Amino acid sequence: MTKKTLFIFSILLMTVGAFASDTDFSGRDISDKGSLLTMEGTFQIDDSEWYLQTKDQLYIVHKGLDWYTEEIGFFPQEGEQITINGFVLGDEISPCTILIGSTSYAFRDSEGSPLWGGRGNRSNERLDGNIKEEEVR
């Protein structure tokens, strides 16, 4: 009986994992696997999630880091008409640029690299407050 329960639990866990992995893309995943397209529609916000509603479909917009959007002055209002040039994979978009009126806001380059990349304090490379040997060189 225990082996049967364990087998059923394993199958259930794999099934849930398969569905979750199909919808949980990062901006990097989308830019690596998606197609570069230009889309127009209405900007929507639900909680802190951003969306583009085209005439045919609702897309999740992976905007990147909050501090970066603030730094570039990107404060769209819900219901604004926007144009996004970016990478599209399924119903998810990783924007390179977002155009509102005549103002363009840049998020990624045409290769998919985020424009905020490489600007951190590299704290993830420090161990116990000490600088790793590679940083000293």
Image: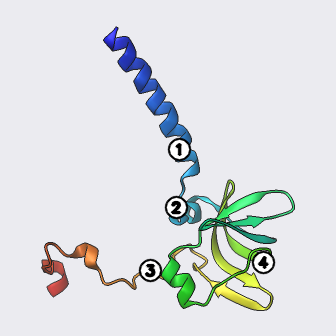
Q: Nearer the viewer, residue 20 or 78?
A: 78
Lower position in the chain sequence, tag 1 or tag 3: 1
Disc 4 marks a residue whose amino acid type is: Ile
The quarter of the rendered structure image containing the N terminus is top left
Q: Quadrant of residue 47?
A: bottom right
Q: Secondary structure at mark 3?
A: loop
Residue contact between numbered discs 2 and 4, judged by CB atoms under 8 Å: no
Cα distance, mark 1 to mark 2? 13 Å
Q: Is residue 67 above or below residue 7?
A: below
> Which of the marked residues, 2 or 3, is nearer the chain's N terminus?
2
Name the quadrant of the C terminus: bottom left
Mark toward the start of the polypeptide (4 vs 1): 1
Callouts 2 and 3 close, C-beta under 8 Å: no
From the top left corner, tell me how far across and down residue 119 is, in percent: 40, 85
Residue 18 falls left or right of residue 75: left
Relative side of 72 to 134, left or right:
right
Report whether 106 appears left or right of 125: right
Dot 2 or dot 4, earlier in sequence: 2
Q: Residue furthest front?
A: 47
Give the residue number, with chain letter if any, for mark 4: 82
- What residue does disc 2 label? 26
Disc 4 residue crowd, few under 14, some 14–19, many 20+, Cα 10 Å: some
Q: Secondary structure at mark 4?
A: strand
Front residue (pair 83, 34): 83
Residue type highlighted by circle 1 = Ala
Measured as percent of width and height from the top left, residue 124 is found at: 27, 73
Q: Rounded to the nearest whole Å, what is the CA distance between mark 2 and mark 3?
A: 14 Å
Q: Which mark is residue 20?
A: 1
Kind of residue at disc 3: Gly
Question: Which residue is the site of mark 3?
Answer: 117
Residue 21 lies, with reference to residue 86, above or below; the image says: above
Residue 18 horizontal/vertical position (percent): 52, 38
